[in-house]
Amino acid sequence: MAQSANNNGAKSPLNDKHLWVKILLGLVLGIGVGLALSPEAGALLPPDLTNEVGAWIELPGVLFLGLLKMVVVPLVICSIIVGIADSGELGFVKAIGSRIILYFVLTSTVAIIIGMSLTYAIQPGAGMPTEFVDQAMAQQAEKMPSQTLEGLSIPQRIANVIPTNPAKAQLEKNMLQIVIAALLVGLALLTLPKAAAKPVLALCQSGQAVAMKIIEWAMVIAPYAVFGLMAKVVIDLGFDAVTTVALYMATVLGGLLIMFFVYLGLAKFVGGVPVWTFLKGIREAQIIAFSSSSSAATIPVSMKCAEENLGIPKRIAGFTIPLGATINMDGTALYQAVAAIFLTQVFGVDLSFSEMALLLVTTVGASIGTPGIPGIGIVVLATILSGIGVPAEGIALILGVDRILDMCRTTINITGDITATVVMNKLV
Ligand code: ASP
């Protein structure tokens, strides 16, 4: 076994008891400075200077995310390979693999049902004046996401899961393909004679340790990074959009909060981790996810939190967290369910029971293929909407507030991944 990434005795930034306080302070100060500089709120500076100052303030955040993204692909590959090959038995992989997939599908379904029920109960889209809808759509139309999902058929999508060109998968950061390739290599190593598997395993153990060391260094600038990212997000936010769809936002946030309590319950009653220990253990990962809006970029920090703060063995966290960040997005699924039903209410589309079931199945499926990057949930939403007869242009209505909701759903996405890890630690 390679030496642990964390030299005993050496002070790790994540062992710094005050790191989370500093990161939280960065978050609060970032919001404050962002508000002061925002053209719509404080406007302390002329607009062109605001952009320039904003880019400088954001710089530590960009550097920090750059470091995380730099190590995320090798870290995911090495962790999955080590997690499987080091487990020593095929039975363990089968047990964890089958349970976690079932668990992911179940929690996504729960998230979607919470989202749908809440939206039907609150009715945020009912009674919106048509002139307002037209006006909002006209204002936001030019900002519509240009990115769309390539129109692949379902068999093509399934075939696409195999990285026929692994180098291309890494170049394009196609996490699902990378995870599949790493799973296969890990399984192959597990079935090879020990002597044949040893060199590749040792290389991956060392690669994992190197990646974790770089993350440890990156964490030193995490408070400044969070400050910069938050300030920039707030500077760029449009506040008028918030007031017009406030009830819709409240529905999404309410749903995410309920999901958060579901996780706390699962972690405590199934995973056996007390609520406070769980919250304390995951807070750095949550703040990084909130300020970066990317569960993929947060993978290294989530893994560190799970292993070092919650004491989950590497062979479990190294497998479940990258897999979860890639295919388990309960926050995104819940948000998509709320957004879809909200738009049916705005456009007066009545969904039959079978259409609701279709929405549920499509959203669970979509959350598996959605990459953990900023703003992608709304792009995938367009595909979901076309399946239930809602005009995709309706997205313009909720585009203005998407960044705020993205930050919150990403936080829930990674909380779900760490909860899954805690639960699997007990169940496998
Ligand atoms: N930003 C989300 C994530 O990385 C995905 C999304 O909902 O847009 O988890």
Image (cartoon, grey):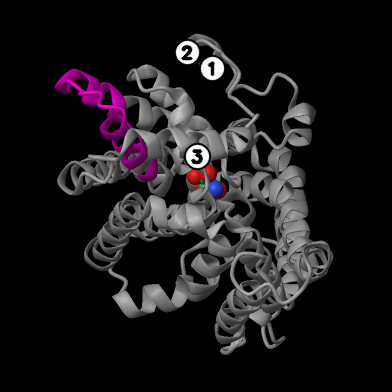
> Tag 2: Cα neighbours inside 10 Å, few (<14), some, or many (≥20)?
few
Residue placed most toward the observer, 292 or 170:
292
Residues at marks 1 and 2 touching, judged by CB atoms closer than 8 Å: yes
Q: Majority secondary structure of the magenta segment?
A: helix
Q: Residue at x 57, y 56 (%)?
A: 238
Q: Which mark is residue 377?
A: 3
Residue 319 drawn in magenta: no
Q: Name which residue type carries label 1.
A: Arg
Percent from the top left, x then y, of residue 235?
66, 65
Residue at numbered disc 1? 157
Residue at numbered disc 2? 154
Task: Decide if residue 316 is on the left or right side of residue 254.
Answer: right
Q: CA distance from mark 3 to mark 1?
A: 18 Å
Q: Residue at x 22, y 26 (%)?
A: 356
Percent from the top left, x then y, of residue 321?
51, 52
Asked where in the image residue 128 lies, by quadrant, the reply is top left
Residue placed most toward the observer, 193 or 82:
82
Q: Please give the count of numbered marks on the rendered protein.
A: 3
Question: Which one is earlier in the sequence, the residue at label 3 or at label 1?
Answer: 1
Q: Secondary structure at mark 3?
A: helix
Quarter of the image containing the N terminus? bottom right
Percent from the top left, x then y, of residue 10?
72, 86
Q: Secondary structure at mark 1?
A: helix
Q: Name which residue type carries label 3.
A: Gly
Q: Which mark is residue 140?
A: none
Asked whether residue 95 appears in the rendered view, the answer is no
Q: Name which residue type carries label 2.
A: Ile
Q: CA distance from mark 1 to mark 2?
A: 5 Å
Residue 345 drawn in magenta: yes
Q: Say if 161 sits above or below 301 in the image.
A: above
Percent from the top left, x then y, of residue 254?
29, 58
Q: Which residues are magenta?
A: 335-360
